[in-house]
Amino acid sequence: MNHSQNIGLLLQSIDEGYFKKAWHGPNLRGSIRGLTAKEAAWRPGKNRHNIWEIVVHCAYWKYIVRRRILGEKRGSFPIKGSNWFKRPDELSKEAWQQDVALLDDMHSMMRETIAQLKSSDLDEAAHGSKQTNRYIISGVAMHDVYHAGQVQLIKRLM
């Protein structure tokens, strides 16, 4: 497989998991389309994550994949903390839209970084990880699909 095929297949996977039509059903972006802030903040149970928290969690891991590929230092994610972030800080349409925009931005930035890789970079260990760049990139696509399923389930429980 040549460079453009390797990178192209990974880009296709992350895009299908995030926003492009896929045979498996709703992708992450599609699963949150049309949700209100109130719906995104609804919790299925005590100490359970809401859709809003899943959205920011997914944005964070797109940031992590990009950071590991580039070897950047920790601490540049726009929200203080790591992995899971208590949401919402403020229940408003604007706050929800800002966090959805953060998810879009993190996807775009990660995608641009992946598109710049050389095929030989794919089998190199990602910075700060024992896993290869190829592994973490394919993993982030699966991460989106996994959480899209959770969002769909939470919406049904609502």
Image (cartoon, grey):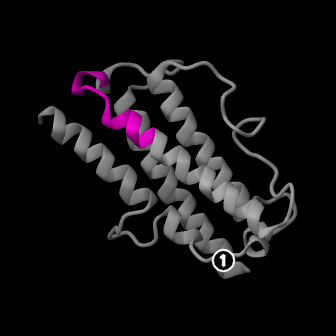
63 left or right of 11 in image: right
What is the x, y in percent for residue 39? 74, 75
Residue 156 vs residue 98, the one in the foreground: 98
For the residue labelled by badge 1, is the local secondary structure a helix, a strand or a loop? helix
Left or right relative to 2: residue 143: right
Q: x and y percent of residue 46 in the render? A: 87, 63
Q: What residue lies at 66% left-to-right and 77% top-to-bottom?
A: 155
Q: Amino acid at mark 1?
A: Lys
Residue 35 position (above or below residue 85): below
Q: Residue at x 41, y 72 (%)?
A: 25
- As drawn, is 133 to the left or to the right of 78? left
Asked if residue 110 shows in the view, the reply is: yes
Vertical relation: 128 (above or below) 28: above
Question: Vertical placement of 42 versus 97: above or below?
Answer: below
Q: Quadrant of the N terminus?
A: top left
**Residue 54 placement: quadrant:** bottom right
Is residue 29 positioned above or below 67 on the image? Answer: below
> What is the chief secondary structure element of the magenta stretch?
helix
10 Å neighbourhood of mark 1: few (<14), some, or many (≥20)? Answer: some
Position of 36 compared to 140: left or right?
A: right
Q: Residue furthest left?
A: 1
Magenta stretch: residue 112 in it? yes
Task: Identify which residue, 47 or 90, lies in the foreground.
Answer: 90
- Give the labeled residue for mark 1: 155
Q: Which residues are magenta?
A: 110-121
Give residue 48's position: percent from left, percent from top.
79, 60
Q: Quadrant of the C terminus?
A: bottom right
**Residue at coordinates 73% horizontally, 69% vertically from top-left?**
40
